[in-house]
Amino acid sequence: MGTENEMEPRGIRKAKVGLVVSDKMDKTVVVRVERLVPHPVYKKYVKKRTTYKAHDEKNEYSTGDRVEIIETRPISKDKRWRVARLIERPVVR
């Protein structure tokens, strides 16, 4: 197939930005991703939300954090995403 130094291209992975809504599981966070879609008849843009379970290896993200998640291999029954990076942490007063 090739030499050891050649790396096979991984392909383009999907990435989404969302808000952590739950961090109660071990090494897992629930991320809510919102998107705008046009209504088929009225053409007004409507918010749609989807929740994804994402892998958080070090349990470092908490509720309220805005994070980027990327597609990965299946980790468990529901987890197909992992947290790539922290975008914004809410200001605590």
Image (cartoon, rainbow, N blue to C red):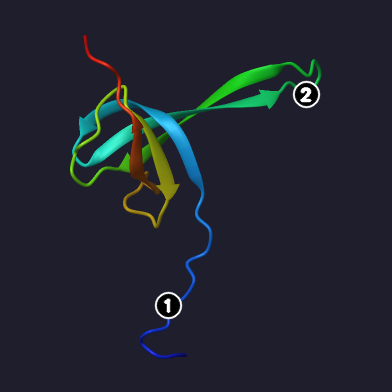
Q: Which residue is mark 2?
A: 40
Label of residue 37 in the image: none
Asked if the residues shown at circle 2 and circle 1 are in contact, with their CB atoms under 8 angstroms apart, the answer is no
The quadrant where residue 5 appears: bottom left
- Seen at 46% across and 76% down, the residue is 8
Q: Residues within 10 Å of mark 2 (few under 14, many from 20)?
A: few
State the CA–CA distance, disc 2 to disc 1.
Answer: 44 Å
5 and 63: which one is in front?
A: 5
12 and 55: which one is in front?
A: 12
What amino acid is at disc 2?
A: Pro
Q: Is residue 49 left or right of residue 88?
A: right
Q: Which residue is mark 1?
A: 7
- What SS does tag 2 mark? loop
- Seen at 57% across and 24% down, the residue is 48
* Residue 26 place in picture, x, y as percent: 18, 39
The quadrant where residue 66 appears: top left
- Seen at 36% across and 46% down, the residue is 84
Q: Is residue 10 left or right of residue 65?
A: right
Q: Which of the marked residues, 2 or 1, is nearer the chain's N terminus?
A: 1
20 and 68: which one is in front?
A: 68
Q: Is residue 36 left or right of residue 89?
A: right
Residue most toward the right? 41
What amino acid is at disc 1?
A: Met
Q: Is residue 9 above or below residue 63?
A: below
Q: Is residue 31 above or below residue 64?
A: below
* Residue 9 place in picture, x, y as percent: 49, 71
Q: Residues within 10 Å of mark 1 (few under 14, many from 20)?
A: few
Q: Is residue 82 above or below residue 74?
A: above
- What SS does tag 1 mark? loop
